[in-house]
Image: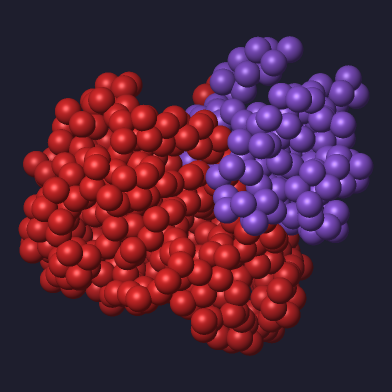
Amino acid sequence: MLTTESLQRIDREIEKYPADQKQSAVMAALAIAQEERGWLSNETIEFVANYLGMAPIAAYEVASFYSMYDLNPVGKYKLTVCTNLPCMLSGGVDAAEYLKAKLGIGFNETTVDGKFTLKEGECMGACGDAPVMLVSNRRMCSCMGPEQIDRLLAELE
Amino acid sequence: MTILGAIQPMLTSGLDGDNAWRLEHYLKRGGYSALKKVLAEKISPDEIIGEVKKSGLRGRGGAGFPTGLKWSFMPRDYQGNKYVVCNSDEGEPGTFKDRDILRYNPHSVIEGMAIAGYAMGASCGYNYIHGEIWEIYKRFEEALDEARSAGLLGANILGSGFDFDLFAHHGYGAYICGEETALLESIEGKKGQPRYKPPFPANFGLYGKPTTINNTETFASIPWIVNLGGDAFLNAGKPNNGGTKIFSISGHVNKPGNYEIPLGTPFSTLLEMAGGMRGGRRLKACIPGGSSSPVVPGDVMMQCTMDYDSIAKAGSMLGSGAVIIIDETVCMVKALERLSYFYYEESCGQCTPCREGTSWLYKIVHRIENGNGREDDLELLESITGNIMGRTICALGDAAALPVQSFVKHFRDEFIYHIEQKKCLVPVDIQRAGSGFFSALS
């Protein structure tokens, strides 16, 4: 189900916790699985649960509770834009509107070519760098004015 | 991170160059000398806790609870594992200081946690890092590797017989995990839903073991206190408000960013350090301690000093030190609408007053903002906030209610105008110009 590399990464996470607390690695394991598979299907979640020796429903509870897990397929790149108040004051909402117009999609939608999914995010803890957006959960982009957004989209082509 | 003025910063000193976060650089500027001193001189745990108490250090995550007192709650004679946990799940809108501490000075947190482990008899720690800052999490893991390789973490640290290991746990998007018991649930691999207190974590914490949870900045302050003494730390601030503090300034200033200043510094000085108001516009309001703290009108804020007591007197809270600056281009109904949406989104759903109440608060503010407000909506908002506060397991309910109460109290005219005129008091084109986003296009 998952590659040897992903399983090795999960094993390293398990080692961080007491031997009888493998479930503690579920958040990291789900993130690693999502990185490999693109999103978390029920089958993937069940696989992770079995790997850690926990009930599949308990792993599903975690996957559905935390907002960065995708329980449905997303585009090649997921762009999450923070629109919370501090970002909004410095253009976060405007940046989201600009992206919607450029990509021709709304929040929680994916472009027809399957390249971009747009998400509205909550505080990323980077308010001084607003507007802020996150590319596929991993790369944070700061001070995203129109020019910077254009450049990012071109780079992700 | 920006440091200005003739202030001796404690948390951000000597952070020059791209490699300042590395162990080598940290050692060069005196890093790990506090841990070495504690281990070499065999300073007693009681003495360390006493020094932290004397320093007046208060929790930097938002609640402001005295750190030394918290440490003293840990049971002494407990047989078995105890834990120290660092809360770097920084998701309070307006706050971004912990990210910079971990980015530029991660070893100060590691050293602070190791000393805390020694003082409280814990041999294992976890640092819970906010989900959205993956790059910072990776860096912290690298810093941990450096410390382990140098014998500063792990078994028998520097030959002292003291064992302490530390691991990073990466969150994945849940504001509620900043609440300490939700954070513990999350480390245990569960949904981040807060626990009933009591029992408090000092008695029943991670995996049911005695646990102390402190904020990133709190731990980062510990080496300084051990090196220079509690009195020196206290004297750097003002009585009951010891030390310096990093303030995160966001919103309508020329130079948003983190600024480390002694507690008790006038707000006007801090505003000046952040480059003053963007476009020279008027300060309409300020949220001084993160989005959960009550909003303060601009003229009142200008009279405040930045410390726990002065901000409390102005009717708000110093919180995490997240200062959100709002100028006259902002419609306060719209601002509140966005904050209310946040709490509605992030309520964990465990307690009915919060789960249902945050939804109602958002829906009502949303309809006022969109010209569908009703005459009795402001009374309704007051009634709902009153029914949330004090009726939930954790503080998120209160955190959702306080902004609503304070926005309506201080900017009542704007809410009434919205309800009666069905539009904003602040013209839409002025609002649009406020963010400066589209001016870059023209």
Indicate whether A58 appears above or below B309.
above
**Residue at image location 82% in from the left, 36% down from the top:** A39
Indicate whether A6 appears above or below A14.
above
Quarter of image, res B49? bottom left
Q: Looking at the image, how many numbered discs can be counted on the residues? A: 0
The image shows residue B243 at horizontal and vertical percentages of: 18, 58
Of A78 and B439, the residue lying toward us? A78
Note the chain letter of the red one.
Answer: B
**Residue at image location 71% in from the left, 34% down from the top:** A32
Of A9 and B221, the residue lying toward us? A9
Query: What colour scheme has been applied to the protein in the rendered image?
Result: by chain
Q: Quadrant of the N terminus of chain B?
A: top left
Note the chain letter of the purple one.
Answer: A
In this view of the protein, can residue B88 be seen by the observer? Answer: no
**Residue at image location 73% in from the left, 12% down from the top:** A157
Of B123 and B160, the residue lying toward us? B160
